[in-house]
Image: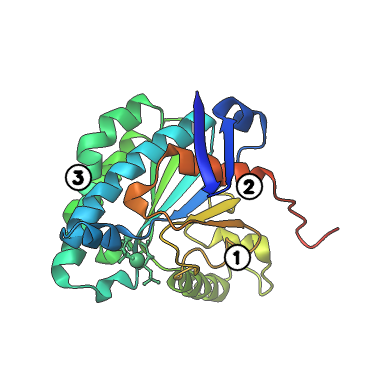
Amino acid sequence: MFWKFKKQKDNSVSFSIDEIMKGQIPNHIAIIMDGNGRWAKKRALPRTAGHHEGMKVVKRVTKLANKLGVHTLTVYAFSTENWKRPREEVNYLLRLPEEFMGTFLPELIEENVQVRIMGNKDAIPAHTLSAVEKAVSETKQNTGLILNFALNYGGRAEIIRAVNQIVIDQNAGKLSAEINDEIFSGYLMSSSLEDPDLLIRTSGEIRLSNFMLWQLAYTEFWFTDVLWPDFREEHLLEAIHAFQKRGRRYGGI
Ligand code: IPE
Ligand code: IPE
Ligand code: MG
């Protein structure tokens, strides 16, 4: 199967999915799914319509990532700062995971995907949390792609939580005074996951917005102007293609 697309007006690129699969597939892809509101505005629709369309894109991207053999796909679904939005939009965003699981869980189970959640669960509405936790438990035995939802997640809150827990464990004599990268990582919400290899952000914004601050230290970044509801399989392939051409040195030569 061929995906052809133009990178610039005069510079078109094409490659096959097979070609990409012969190269190195990123082990962990993290995505800041941005631009739902602008997508809706362009169509004179309510912002929630953009979020609903965006949810469908998560399904498509999950399926392709799983086919490609990506180990983990982390998607930023709701940040600790998104509470600043109007209440109706917050409510809608926090209901979406329930709809996602309601319509997609059987397929996730069939496709061998494992669902995970990362974030401060305390403030997530009970109905949403129970829908996600049901998905986590029903996909626990699966061995394919890990689909990790960052929900009510913030990088700083995650780091502060880790520090507080480390102090508690040190005071209880469960942890020595000296901590290192590995011990610290073990206290993060992503403790069971490798750091992302590739970060994708849509909608033309070039910032992290408090996403995985510790884990992205040596991640390759890929930004696109495409709005999240318009993101398609070819864009994921384009990002992976770009990733495959990067030289990762981690400070070496
Ligand atoms: C991303 O789209 C979804 C979330 C942040 C939850 P936005 O809602 O941020 O869309 P824009 O950035 O306003 O276009
Ligand atoms: C980041 O997008 C959060 C998510 C995608 C969930 P935002 O739209 O909230 O980020 P800012 O406000 O533009 O930085
Ligand atoms: Mg945004």
On screen, residue 229 versus residue 32, left or right, reads left
Location of residue 35 by image quarter: bottom left
Foreground: 182 or 231? Answer: 231
| Residue 135 versus residue 51 in the image, above or below | above
Q: Is residue 94 left or right of residue 250?
A: left
Color scheme of the displayed model? rainbow
Point out the tag, 3 or 1, that comes first from the N-terminus. 3
- Where is ligand 2, by quadrant? bottom left
Alpha carbon separation for disc pair 3 and 1: 35 Å
The residue under label 1 is which amino acid type?
Answer: Phe
| Residue under the image location 66 percent in, 43 percent down | 244
Name the residue beneath numbered marker 3.
Answer: 99
**Residue 1 coordinates in the image, percent (x, y):** 50, 23
Q: Position of residue 91 (x, y in %)?
A: 17, 62
* Residue type, mark 2 in image: Phe
Q: CA distance from mark 2 to mark 1?
A: 27 Å
Of the residues tagged 2 and 1, which is closer to the observer? 2
Q: Residue at the location (63% across, 29% down)?
A: 19
- Amino acid type, label 3: Glu
Dot label at residue 243: 2
Mark 2 or mark 1: name the one nearer the start of the chain: 1
How many residues crowd around disc 2 within 10 Å: few (fewer than 14), some, or many (20 or more)? many
* Disc 1: residue Cβ within 8 A of ligand 2's nearest atom: no
> Tag 2, which secondary structure?
helix
Secondary element type, mark 3: helix
